[in-house]
Image (cartoon, rainbow, N blue to C red):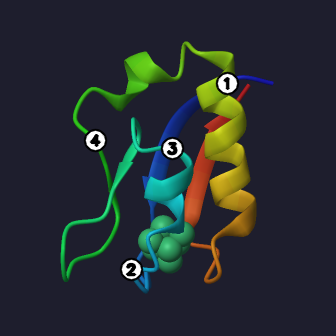
Amino acid sequence: MTIRRVWIEEGCISCNLCEDLAAEVFEVPAGGESRTRKGYERQLENLDTQERVQEAADSCPVEVIQVEDD
Ligand code: SF4
């Protein structure tokens, strides 16, 4: 399984967990909702990053992190 795309649906509660797990992919601006960093796709070439992105998706308390894999 390889994650190709990551996005965040509405409803983020800005808990910062995803950025704590994978700061090269997620950023949670102060007072704002999580978003993917510009050019994050390149970071997904790293298997360790993939695992942490999946962990973030599995751990997000409101389950708004979506991943597309193949
Ligand atoms: S883990 Fe989920 S709720 Fe927390 S900041 Fe990330 S997207 Fe938002």
CA separation, marks 4 and 1?
17 Å
Residue that numbered label 3 is attached to: 22
User: Marks 3 and 4, Cα distance to the nearest angstrom?
Assistant: 11 Å
Q: Closer to the N terminus: mark 4 or mark 2?
A: 2
Task: Name the residue rendered at 44%, 70% in the picture.
Answer: 16
Which residue is identified by label 4? Answer: 37
Q: Are marks 1 and 2 in contact (CB under 8 Å)?
A: no
Q: Is mark 2 within 8 Å of ligand 1?
A: yes
Disc 2: which residue: 14
Q: Give amino acid for label 2.
A: Ser
Front-most of 15 and 4? 15
Q: Is residue 20 found left or right of 48 in the rendered image?
A: left
- Which label's residue is closer to the chain start, 4 or 1? 4
13 with respect to 3 (left or right): left
To which residue does mark 1 refer? 48
Residue 66 place in picture, x, y as percent: 58, 56
